[in-house]
Image (cartoon, coloured by chain):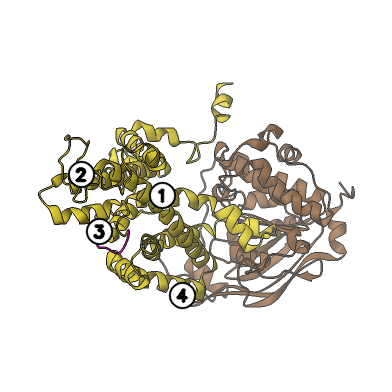
Chain colours: A yellow, B brown
Amino acid sequence: MSLDGALTRRPRGAWLRLPRVWRSPLAVVGAAIAVAWLVVAVSAPAWVPYPPDAQQLPRLSPPGEGTLLGTDALGRDVFSRLMTGASTTIPLALGLVVASAVIGVVVGAVAGWFGGWVDEALMRLTDLVMAFPTVILAMVVAASLGPSLYNAVIAAVVVSWPQYARVTRSLVLGLRTLNYVVAGRLLGRSPVTSLVVDVAPNVVGPVVVLATLDVGAAVLLLSGLSFLGLGAQPPTAEWGSMISGALANFDAWWIGTFPGLAILTVVMAFNFLGDALRDAVDPTSRTERTAVGVASAPQSVELPVEEDRP
Amino acid sequence: MASDDPAPTAAAETAPVLVVDGLVVRYPGPPPVVAVDGVSLRIGAGEVVALVGESGCGKSSLARAVMGVERRASGTVEVDGAPVAPLGLRRRPLAQTGVQMVFQDPSTSLNPRRSLGAQIDDGAAVARARGSATAEPAVWLERVGLDPAWTSRHPHQLSGGQKQRVAIARALAAAPRLLVADEPISALDASTQTAVAALMRSLTTAVGAALLFISHDLSVVRRIADSTLVMHAGRIVESGPTELLWDDPQHPYTRSLLGAVPVPDGAGRIPAAPTEAERATWGDPAVPERA
């Protein structure tokens, strides 16, 4: 029976629909660039032509004259520093996204699940953090902790978790009164078990999308703090501080341009990837884009996309 | 099955399974609504009691309050002599997992991310933990008329009626003493409604459980319920054995409900809705304003 064959196909849960992601060319480009940078981040120290801190080359030599991307004011190889910078920034950006997602999801889930004064207290705290401009608040935190790359990450976590809390809370609020959640409670599940078994799996998809989109923002925030001198300290090779150093030698365009391009490509790659993931997890946003079934209003949680951080 | 005594009415004469006394459910305003206004009822083991009434009369509030899902303003609910605690932040004690519910909307009754077998086994697990007789998920699927091989399927692969059968299987797998079904057939098509209702009756009476069956479909109620409660504006206005109620309704609201049942006699008669004047004579404290 042919119908039976159709029924026994694999469930089309969000994750199993993932292959549709690859139908979008931007997703493929984004994934390729992101994977390339991840490979670089992991392997760069092993194969860069010069140590990132070695001041052994002619100073301020342009690209192509002995080195691939030129040298900076201290005679360090820009290419080597660029590649090493990837292994500084990208793992920290990923770690910072994971940390803020975990904090935000826990706060949002507790607020949405328990409601009442717990919800009020946690959400007002969230509002408080959200009320400050992200970079300004991160600067305050980083400056008060003392400038270092790890303090910059802590500062970035402090300002990044509220968006996850918001999204998670709204999802949990909608889920907790669903019949199957109540049925689970009637079968003797504790609130925590119910949250983990019945509610959490439906929150994971949107949060992963949000986190993917947020990697770009995290890279921007970290390099922005480093650019301002609140993150990576010399002589650490980091993209933001490389651009900051380039300001002193404005004529040597290659010192700042290549780290800038590196930041641009990483941020764009993760944004493309996140967009494609969102379309895969949330079919309504895709139908809107292709202008089919526009009549139906979007019913999903709109994920905030912040692409305009410095 | 533990008992092969199929005489439900005789069993009902002994100790009732469900005892509800003076149950009140209020919703905060403005204006505050008294959805359930001092309802008392008793259901014996193996007995099927139907609760009928128009939408908004408090049927669902009563069901949810009995389960402890809805806050009770006052009144007591006891199953087998033990009070049913409100479902708050605490885990429901194992002893009370014999109180189960089937919901109106089958589309949200099952967790979309877990297999049917796993979800039915949730019910079977509490029955085993209580030491009650239950069966494997595949057996339960078969009992509710589905293919036992479907344990690894997921809810989106089923139709609404099939999902409702799985939800019933999960509730029954927990070996309930009391099963409350809140309009379990209203989301199903006409041909499935009677089958699912009859299925619920046969499976609950077989294990000697009490069944509170909420419906606005009187023709189905007539076929499965031992006795019927008629609810209007938060109160039970009439109760009695189903056949008696059908043949000789006492309360005017019951008569109007029965008068609204469509009869497929080919005469093209359209069911009559009660008029405002009729409603006024029922002593209805909360006649809804005309839309």
At label 3, the amino acid type is Phe
Mark nearer the N terminus (4 vs 2): 2
At label 1, the amino acid type is Pro
Residue position marked by numbered label 4 in the rendering: A121
What percent of the width, then of the height, locates residue A162?
40, 64
Residue position marked by numbered label 3 in the rendering: A227
Q: CA distance from mark 3 to mark 1?
A: 18 Å
Taking the spot 58% from the left edge, 48% from the top edge, the residue there is B111
Q: Depth check: give the residue in front, B131 or B21.
A: B131
The chain holding disc 4 is A
The chain holding disc 2 is A
What percent of the width, then of the height, locates residue B54?
56, 61
Q: Depth check: give the residue in front, A308 or B74.
A: A308
Q: CA distance from mark 2 to mark 3?
A: 19 Å
Q: CA distance from mark 4 to mark 2?
A: 53 Å
Mark nearer the N terminus (1 vs 4): 1
Total marks shown come to 4
- Measured along the vertical axis of the image, is residue A239 above or below residue B80? above
Mark nearer the N terminus (2 vs 1): 2
**Mark 3 residue element:** helix
The reply, left or right, for residue A51 in relation to residue B114 is left
Tell me which segment is drawn in magenta.
A228-232
At label 4, the amino acid type is Ala
Residue position marked by numbered label 2 in the rendering: A71
